[in-house]
Amino acid sequence: MNRKVVLILIPLLLVSSIILSMPKTSAQVEYLDVGIIVPKKYPFGEAVTGGTEAGAIMGALDINNTGGIKVGDTTYYIRLHLINEWSHPTIWNPENAKAELRAAIDAGVRYLIGGFRTEMVEILRDQVVFPWNEAHPSDPVLWLINGASTDYLCQDWSVDPRYRWIFRVMPINSTALADTVIGYLIEYLVPMKLARMFTPTVKFAIVAEALAWTIPICERLEKEGLGPNATWYKTWRTPVGSGTEVFKPILDECAGAGVDLIVHIYTLSDVLTLVGLWNTFKYPFILVGIDVPSQCFLVIDWTGGKCNYECHMMVSGSRTPIIPGMTEVWWDRFVEMWKAWPAYTAWGAYMGLFTLKNAIETAKSIDQFDVRDTLEEVETQQLNGICKFIYETHDIYCDSVGATWDGKYIRGYMVQWIYKDEWKGLPLNEAYKGFKAMVVSPVNMPFSRKFTIPPWIYPLAEVDINFDGIVDIFDIVVLALAFGSKGGDPNWNIEADITMDGLVDIFDIVKIALQFGSQYSPFPIPDPS
C-alpha cells in the first residue's frame, strides 16, 4: 500500500471501525455515522485489493475534504464504522456479523452501505435491521445494499412496508445481470460471430455455482435459450469448493460434445479453477458470463494469466472513460491511492456515500424519513452513469442491458481480459502485467472494443471481419465503409477496428493486408463427429 496512505489511515483505525472525521470547531459541525458492511477475506471487501473498504474510505475522504455535507448552517462530516460481514465460506459466522451490526446501530449508525453475500444480507436484514426498525419506528435504519444482487433482497414496499428502508446501490439485480449477458449474446456475439463460425448451430452449456442466486438465471437460459442460432446442451451446478476434479470432466465432456460456448455464473473463487483449466488445455469453446472474482485485477495472478480471453460482466473496463473526464480521472486517483483497481463493490461504496450526500443536501435534512423520500425521487450523476432507484422496489434503475447503450443510466458492461506484450510496460492505472479488461459491450460507445475469439479456436478471427473463413476483398470492403470512424460515428463498425484502438485507420488496413488471402478450413467449424 502507498506509504502516504498508510500514514493517513493508521491513526484512524479504532478496533472494528474507521473514523474519518474533522475536528469539531463549533456547534455548526457534526458527524454523520455511516456503517460499511465489509466482506472481510474477500477481495471485494478489503482496501488493499480495491474493495468495499477502499471505496468507502476514499468516498468519505473526498466528502470530508471538500467541505462535508451541508444542511443549512450545519456541516456534517462522514464517520465510517466498518462492520465485518463474516460471509466468506471459511469464516462464515452470522452471530458475529449480527453482533457487529447491532453494536454499530447502538453506537448511532442509522445509514448502512454494503453487504456482499446474499445469504448474509438476508440474515442481517431479517434478524437485525427489520427488528430494529419495527421496535424503533421513529428512528429507523436505512440500508443501501452494495454487493448482493439477488432480486428478492429488494421488494415492493407497498406490499411489505419494511422494504421501504432497503435500497440497492450496486449492482444491478440478478435479472438485469442476466439480461446484460443474454442481451449481448443474443443481439451481437451469437449472430455476428459464433453462428457464422460454428455449424450446424451454436451449442451452449451452462456451468454455475450451486447457490440460490444462480437458479433463475440457469432456468431462464434453459427455457429461453440464446436465439434461433443457438441450442442448449446441458447445465452443471457445481457445489461450493469445487476444484479440478469437478471442472475437468465437465470441460472434457463439453469439448467432446461440440459445445461452442459456456455461460458461466459465479461469485466464489471456484471459478478460477474453471477459467485456468479452460485456457491451459485450450478448449475449443469460448467463456462468457458472470465471474465476480474476475472483476478483481488480481485474477491475473490467481489464474497465472489464464484469464486471457475470458469475457464477463463488470462495472467498467480498465480506465474506461464511461463519463469522459470523470470516470477515468476517478480511476487514476483510486489506483494512485490504493495501488489496486477498483472492484465493483468499491464503485458501489463510493457512489453510495455520494448518493447519500446528495439525498441529504437535497432534502436539507439528515432525518431518515426525509432522506428515504428523497432517494425515491432524485437522480444523481455518478461515475458510470445516472443513478436513480425504481420507486416501488428501490432497486437501481437500469433501462439498458443489451448490446447498445444511450449513455445515460447506470448499467453493467461485458468486458474481456486481453493480454498484449506492448501493454507490459504500461503503468498500473492502464494495465496490469500486460492485461487490460476491455469493454466489448455495449458495442456502440467510443470506449468499446471488439470481442476477440481465442486464436486456438479460430486463428483468423482478428482479420476475418465478416467471418466467412477467408481474408479477402469482402473484408476490405467492410473496413473501407468504416474507414476513419470511431465509436459512436454513423459508419462505425466495431469489427473493423482490428487493432482495438478505437479508430478504423491505416493500421487496421495493414493488419488485413499482412494476412490477405489466408483461408481456414474447414469453415464453418463443425462439431466433433
Image (spheres, rainbow, N blue to C red):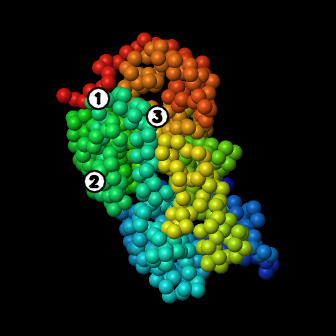
Judged by depth in the image, the label closer to the viewer, 1 or 3, is 1
Q: The disc labelled 1 sits on which kind of residue?
A: Thr
Q: Between marks 1 and 2, how big is the CA–CA gap?
A: 27 Å
Pointer 3 residue: 451
Viewer-closest of 245 and 478: 478
Q: Between marks 2 and 3, how big is the CA–CA gap?
A: 27 Å
Viewer-closest of 191 and 68: 191
Q: Position of residue 51 (x, y in %)?
A: 53, 57
Pointer 2 residue: 237
Q: Position of residue 260 (x, y in %)?
A: 31, 35
SS at mark 3?
A: loop
Q: Left or right: where does residue 180 sit relative to residue 326? A: left
Q: Left or right: where does residue 193 sit relative to residue 63? A: left
Whichever of labels 2 and 3 marks the residue nearer the N terminus, that label is 2
Q: Is residue 88 above or below residue 372?
A: above
* Figure disc tally: 3
Q: The disc labelled 2 sits on which kind of residue?
A: Arg
